[in-house]
Image (cartoon, rainbow, N blue to C red):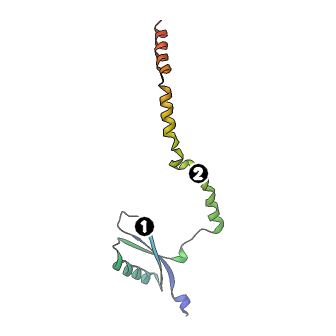
Amino acid sequence: MGSEGFYQEYEVFSKRNDAAPIQYQFSLLAPNEELALIMAQENFMRREPVSDIWVVKRSYIRKMTAPERQSLQRIDNKDYRNTKGYGYLKKKWRQYEQGMLDEKEILSWGGEHDREKA
């Protein structure tokens, strides 16, 4: 058996604590998943505390094909979902409120009220 088939690529993920999200860390080569987990543990013992480590054989991970990635580009026209696109609304609302309470408007309320009494 050649060295080509002996080692397999694994991707390592970890969580800092039980409430933290899982994060991608690095790739490693190992002959099997048990040794991949041991190698990942050894790496973290020297660096940082973690509450959980996952190792996944790279061949088990499905990534998007080129045509599938192209389908993501159609989502790019959704500026209305970004709050930065609504920055002008505060100014517009202030102008609207000031326009509603001008002198003519206030005086017209009294005139309508007087007409209703008559």
Numbered mark located on residue 110 in the image: none
Q: Residue furthest top?
A: 118
Q: Which residue is mark 2?
A: 78
Foreground of the two, 99 or 26 = 99
Q: Earlier in the sequence, mark 1 or mark 2?
A: 1
Q: Quadrant of residue 47?
A: bottom left
Return the residue found at the far right. Answer: 67
Indicate which label's residue lies in the foreground, 1 or 2: 2
Residue named by callout 1: 22
Residue 114 in the image, given as x and y percentages of width and height: 46, 10
7 or 91: nearer the eye?
91
Q: Is residue 55 left or right of residue 64?
A: left
- What residue do we see at 48% from left, 34% from top? 94
103 vs 97, nearest the viewer: 103
Q: Amino acid at mark 1?
A: Ile
* x then y, percent, for residue 8: 51, 83
Q: Quadrant of residue 49?
A: bottom left
Q: Is residue 92 left or right of residue 65?
A: left
Q: Is residue 91 above or below residue 105?
A: below
From this view, report whether residue 105 is shown above or below residue 111. Answer: below
Give the structural element (helix, strand or loop) at label 1.
loop
Up-down relation of residue 71 to residue 27 (above or below): above
Say which element carries label 2. loop
